[in-house]
Image (cartoon, rainbow, N blue to C red):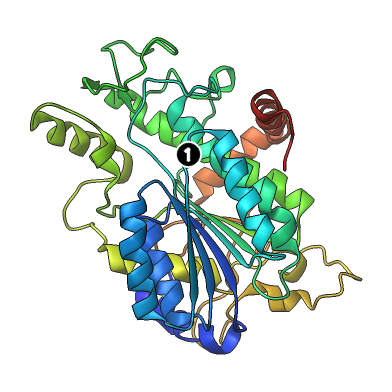
Amino acid sequence: MVTLEQMRSSNARIPECLPPGVVAVFVGGTGGIGEATMKQFAKHAVQPRIYFVGRSERAAVRITAELTTINPGGQYHFIPADLSLLQNVDEVCYEIQSHETLINLLFLTPGTMVTGKETPEHLYYPTAVTYYARIRLIVNLLPLLQKAPSLRRVVTVFGGTKEGPLSVGDLQGRSLGLLTTTSTPKPPPTTNTTGTLTKPNPSHLVQLRAHTSSMMTLALESLALEAPDVSFVHSFPGFVRTHLGREVRAASASAVGLVKVVLNKVVGPIGGGTIPLAEAGERQLFVATSGRFPARWCGGGEGVEGSGVAVASTAGVGLVEGEGVGVARGSDARAGSGVYSVNFDGEAQGVKVEEAVQRLRDADLVRRLWLHTVGEFVRVTGTEFV
């Protein structure tokens, strides 16, 4: 376990380890963990350029003012977007590409508690927000990440260390509803357009988390094959009180209890294990910047010559000998292998999860999932990337 004090020590070295003018993109940055981490990044970075993407322009005005107070030397740009639509995701990427030639950090937190409905692009809503939008953002912005002369990192905050079986015949997860709109295991995939909250389906909660978490980690492994000079982290933040449940519309106080049932099942009991939001921001900043999570090229994996960049400089805040924090074990159980599945305490997945994910690899699901993902991109947008 990496202690909170060790994380804070690493974060405090950001000004001396990362150059002025680092560029960071926070998607889902108008609330919750994304906002908290972005504020920590602004606090520690020197003259950062930060783009943050979200739905609430009202929140963005407040956040921009707060970021400016935290670090007057930074530049802060809000991009409004509904990320449930891949066409909107592409517009966000066009906007960033028009202003930047490189990105150091892509930090992804968009999520939802709403299920039981489809997007206009015929993707299952929660999977569109949590999986397809995030992977599309990474694919589109990966060339800019590869051009960064210092930190090159992608962090997607969802269910790292919680991977498990995949429902291969239902990759969008329609039959694994988190909050279903009927009392039956399979909600109607297309007829419900409101995402009305009626009854939980507790027996499917852990299945859905394991399913989507595995999709995320396997997709990152595919991306790392194309970009071994970028590090990819799939992080689990623990239970953090955020605004996510506000999306769930209900007419009575019973909805509050329903949301608690869901959260208890997915992330553990609410109470002593709750992580304060500001602390979650500190923890995720460590994940986003520490040399504990290097890309494969600079992690002692395969090594590549002729890139023109000292790849060790892309690993982030250097590790200090004697502090007890070393290079993390990757999702493939090898230290420094470039893709990391990480718990809130900075530790990698356990042996059981490693075995579960290896079974998916053995079933050729890295390739099959990627073909499915790209196929959906092409169906919806006409392109594999922009």
Report x, y in % for residue 280.
Answer: 34, 64
Along the viewing direction, whichever of 111 and 312 lies nearer the viewer: 111
Report x, y in % for residue 187.
Answer: 37, 13
Along the viewing direction, whichever of 63 and 178 lies nearer the viewer: 63
Q: Which residue is drawn at 62% across and 42% down?
A: 90
Report x, y in % for residue 380.
Answer: 64, 26
Specify whether residue 307 is in view.
yes
Residue 156 appears left or right of 39: right
Q: What element carries label 1?
A: helix
**Where does label 1 land, which residue?**
130
Q: Which residue lies furthest to the right in this view?
A: 306
Q: Which residue is drawn at 41% across and 23% down?
A: 176
Along the viewing direction, whichever of 65 and 28 lies nearer the viewer: 65
**Within the image, what quadrant is residue 300 found in?**
bottom right
Report x, y in % for residue 326.
Answer: 57, 75
Q: Which residue is drawn at 17% across and 58% down?
A: 272
Residue 225 appears left or right of 61: right
Packing grade of label 1 (10 A; few <14, some 14-19, many >=20) is many
Residue 91 appears left or right of 211: right
**Within the image, what quadrant is residue 169 found in?**
top right
Quarter of the picture containing the C terminus is: top right
Quarter of the picture containing the N terminus is: bottom left
Q: In this view, does 248 lie above or below 6?
A: above
Q: Which residue lies furthest to the left in this view?
A: 253
